[in-house]
Amino acid sequence: MSMLEYTLKDDVAVLVMNNGENRFNPTFIDEFMKVLDEIENTTSADVLVVKSAHEKIFCNGIDLDWLMPFVQKGDQDAVRGFCYKLNALLRRLLLYPMPTVAAITGHAFAGGAIMCCCFDFRFMRSDRGFFCFPEVDLGIPFWPGMVAMVRKAIPQYKLDEMYYLGTRLSGSECEQHHIVVKACPMEKLMDETITFAGGLKKKRAFYGAQKQRMNADIVRIIDEVDPGVLDTGRISV
């Protein structure tokens, strides 16, 4: 089974992450980028939906088992390269030239929750899973671009609590605070998501231009602030 697979439902591309907890490492990111390119360049899709195959987890952020050996031996080139690679994936999702919808099928923690914020819209299961930024309890700061990304999706009054306290939110709480469009039981999640996605038919060129303008300030921070020159002994997970 591939780490990422997609199917087309009419003109909705449903991309499934199949890599366990779907943690970010170079191999997973490269495959993710490859599939995004394939959907954009070789299909008629005009909406992208992303879900996880894992029964409990959507995405748990950076693959620390892969990363920490490089951090511990001070291999700054490897760490810097990874920082650029992850930023490139998040930037790609932020500007993807069609409506994007995250179907949050389980826990979205740390980098996984940040990735969700890069989608245009989010749905989440109400019966299991938390949305959380645990970095404050781990003693790990966000990169500047990540701060800008989460501000796009989360009201500041709630983001303050999540960012500074590491508060976990359920799907229902995410809906209450307008972080997700809707929270619903797992058995209804994909039907609700696909129904919503099917009504988002937009012209790619126009929609892509809208996203570039809406997210220009976020992209400027991503492009201008080098995450590789930050304290690589403390890497956002």
Image (cartoon, rainbow, N blue to C red):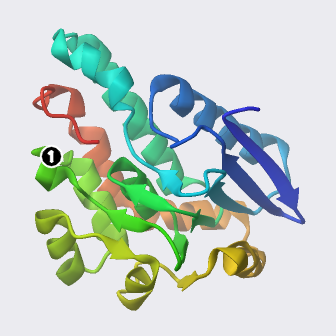
Q: Position of residue 108 (x, y in %)?
A: 43, 58
Task: Determine the image quadrant of residue 18.
Answer: top right
Residue 100 position by quadrant = bottom right
| Residue furthest bottom in the image | 176
Tell me where residue 170 appears, x and y as whole percent.
40, 76
Is 103 positioned to the left or the right of 64 in the image? Answer: right
Task: Report the side of 9 relative to 234 (left or right).
Answer: right
Q: Which residue is mark 1?
A: 138
Task: Give the residue displayed 20% in from the left and 48% down from the top.
Answer: 142
Query: Which amino acid type corresponds to the residue marked 1 in the rendered image?
Result: Leu
Percent position (x, y) of residue 30?
A: 56, 28
| Nearer to the camera, 142 or 95 | 142
Q: Secondary structure at mark 1?
A: helix
Residue 111, horizontal then vertical, whole percent: 36, 48
**Residue nearest the viewer, comparing 232 with 212:** 232
Q: Residue at x 47, y 78 (%)?
A: 180
Q: Quadrant of residue 158?
A: bottom left
Q: Residue at x 22, y 10 (%)?
A: 75
Give the residue displayed 44% in from the left and 37% down from the top: 88
Count of number-bearing discs? 1
Q: Quadrant of the C terminus?
A: top left
Which quarter of the figure is the N terminus placed in?
top right
Q: Residues within 10 Å of mark 1 (few under 14, many from 20)?
A: few
Left or right: where 198 falls relative to 68: right
